[in-house]
Image (tube, grey):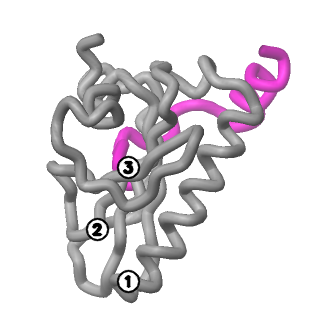
Amino acid sequence: MDCIFCKVIARQVPGYFVLEEKEYVAFLDIFGSTDGHTLVVPRRHGYSVLEYNEKELGKLMTGVQEVARKLKKALKTDSITIGINHEEKRGVPHLHIHLIPRFENDGGGIIQSVVKKGLKRDLGEIAKELREA
């Protein structure tokens, strides 16, 4: 398989692991945006949240919770930005959750600052479409 995360998990390429469990692992992002930027990754390869069942996603979130505890304890973070680039074409095609430690005056923004297009449609109309989907 050509997935870099699968290679990290299989120890075919180096990884800086901070947590290893049966269903998932957590390792530092080598292109992290700050010290401690960690990825929580399911061991089973899949591209998006739609390829995992409820139990698998629950275990993954357990990993996110554990890494968040470790980041707060070890790095004394002010907060942590947690995000998933679901089906992101430019990223690694293996589901992963980013935990980015935040500190006062770190220059980062809130998660809504990732896309700056703004709302264009009526919220009621969008909510109706989503309910009916």
**Magenta part of the protein: which range?**
113-133
Residue 39 has which mark? 3
Residue 91 visible in the current orientation: no
Which residue sits at x=46%, y=74%? 70
Which residue sits at x=24%, y=27%? 4
Q: Relative to residue 97, is residue 75 depicted above or below? A: below
Q: Percent x, y for residue 117? A: 37, 39
Residue flagged by tag 1: what amino acid is it?
Ala
Q: Relative to residue 118, is residue 75 depicted above or below? A: below
Q: CA distance from mark 3 to mark 2?
A: 10 Å
Q: Which residue is label 1 attached to? A: 74
Q: Quadrant of the N terminus?
A: top left
Residue nearer the viewer, 74 or 126: 74
Which residue sits at x=22%, y=70%? 35
Q: Percent x, y for residue 80? A: 44, 70
**Could you classify mark 3 by the number of other residues whose Cα lies within 10 Å: few (under 14), some (14-19), or many (20 or more)?**
many
Specify the farthest residue to the top: 1
Q: Which residue is label 2 attached to? A: 36
